């Protein structure tokens, strides 16, 4: 499920180049118009001509306002706004469907997406469901399209995959710290713990504002530590980094995820990645530890600013757009 270049014999919209010959732009559909979806739509509209990318359609769980549609249509007249996901079948030309919505949308519609185009998953925590993962594997074996998983916030993704392919990987552990307001928890008990942390943090801030006293130290709690599969069920929106590591490395049952709710993380997310190789004959062991702190717009954000940019890069990478736009760009292999 690595990112790869699309076949150059793609179907697309003809665009006249400066040499008056016709080239084809890759048509992209965006599933989900939250903050990340909005960012990707803006990037395609602003830089699409440079990278030969074009918007085919946008779908969101709640319909876009007429004002929003009008603003997009002024800049991208050919884009379609879908009222239902099944209307994808009515789109004549689409080369890549990008999901940036929710794991449940992946589970419900991945097979439909793959019938229509190549598919880039932004919510890989959906693949922690073993039954769905097997169904998707069977689908990929028989369809003519491919599936990609964006690396998102996972630094060192290629290295983890390389070690796994060579059977040199022993353990992968991902520790993730978020402000409690940015967590979307499915487990009722953990949600109650997290809500209590939010409540206490709000009270402390109010008391500090009223008394002009020094603020109390920030609080943090470990909500979960264990196999990635269970974490993806508990916090599907906050576990995509762990899910990506599991897919590339030692699997959902052997990748360890740790989810921390921390009131000090108002302006950034913290992700620690610990990778250990299998011991050598003389009992020496390869080990890498990365500490990633990525800024966010607010404590409520599920995705950091760097994750937005990383996702855009994934689209450019899997469509081969960097290669076409920059003929002399060095390709790392």
Image (cartoon, rainbow, N blue to C red):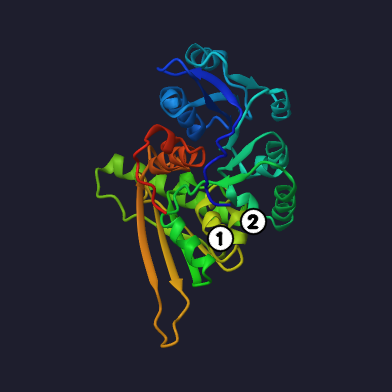
Q: Earlier in the sequence, mark 2 or mark 1?
A: 2
Q: Whole-percent x and y of residue 317? A: 47, 41
Q: Would you place residue 283 above or below residue 144 in this image?
A: below
Which residue does the numbered mark 1 point to in the structure image? 246
Mark 1 surroundings within 10 Å by alpha-carbon count, few (fewer than 14), some (14 through 19), many (20 or more) = many
Q: Would you place residue 228 above or below residue 25 in this image?
A: below
Separation of disc 2 and disc 1 at Cα?
9 Å
Image-based side of 333 in relation to 255, left or right: left
Which residue corresponds to the image point at 57% horizontal and 13% vertical from the top-left? Answer: 66
Mark 2 surroundings within 10 Å by alpha-carbon count, few (fewer than 14), some (14 through 19), many (20 or more) = many
Which residue corresponds to the image point at 46% horizontal and 49% vertical from the top-left? Answer: 180
Q: Whole-percent x and y of residue 210? A: 30, 40
Cβ atoms at labels 2 and 1 below 8 Å apart: yes
Question: For this rendering, which residue is in front, 233 or 6?
Answer: 6
Image quadrant containing the C terminus: bottom left
Which residue does the numbered mark 2 point to in the structure image? 128
Q: Would you place residue 64 above or below residue 275 in this image?
A: above
Image-based side of 116 in relation to 193, left or right: right
Q: Would you place residue 40 above or below residue 189 in this image?
A: above
Q: Whole-percent x and y of residue 259? A: 49, 58
Question: For this rendering, which residue is in front, 317 or 294?
Answer: 317
Q: Whole-percent x and y of residue 265? A: 37, 49
> Within the image, what quadrant is residue 207 found in?
top left
Which residue corresponds to the image point at 57% horizontal and 46% vertical from the top-left? Answer: 148
């Amino acid at each position: 499920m690595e990112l790869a270049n699309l076949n150059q014999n793609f179907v697309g919209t003809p665009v006249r180049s400066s040499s008056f010959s016709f080239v084809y732009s890759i048509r992209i559909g965006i599933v989900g118009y939250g903050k990340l979806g909005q960012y990707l739509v803006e990037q395609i509209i602003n830089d699409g001509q440079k990278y030969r990318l074009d918007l085919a359609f946008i779908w969101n769980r709640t319909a876009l306002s007429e004002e929003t549609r009008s603003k997009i249509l002024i800049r991208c007249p050919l884009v379609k706004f879908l009222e239902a996901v099944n209307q994808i079948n009515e789109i004549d030309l689409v080369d890549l469907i990008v999901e940036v919505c929710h794991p449940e949308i992946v589970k419900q519609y991945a097979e439909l997406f793959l019938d229509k185009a190549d598919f880039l998953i932004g919510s890989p925590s959906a693949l922690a469901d073993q039954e769905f993962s097997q169904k998707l594997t069977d689908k990929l074996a028989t369809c003519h399209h491919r599936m990609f998983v964006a690396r998102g916030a996972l630094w060192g993704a290629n290295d983890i995959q390389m070690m796994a392919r060579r059977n040199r990987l022993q353990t992968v552990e991902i520790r993730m710290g978020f402000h409690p307001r940015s967590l979307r928890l499915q487990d009722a008990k953990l949600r109650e713990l997290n809500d209590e942390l939010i409540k206490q943090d709000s009270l402390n801030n109010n008391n500090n504002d009223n008394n002009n006293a020094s603020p109390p130290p920030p609080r943090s709690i470990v909500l979960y530590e264990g196999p990635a599969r269970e974490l993806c069920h508990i916090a599907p929106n906050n576990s995509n980094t762990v899910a990506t590591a599991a897919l590339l490395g030692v699997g959902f049952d052997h990748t360890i995820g740790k989810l921390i709710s921390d009131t000090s993380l108002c302006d950034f997310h913290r992700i620690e990645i610990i990778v250990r190789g299998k011991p050598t004959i003389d009992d020496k062991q390869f080990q890498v530890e990365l500490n990633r702190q990525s800024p966010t717009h607010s404590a409520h954000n599920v995705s950091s600013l760097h994750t937005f940019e990383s996702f855009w890069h994934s689209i450019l990478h899997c469509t081969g757009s960097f290669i076409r736009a920059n003929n002399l760009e060095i390709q790392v292999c």
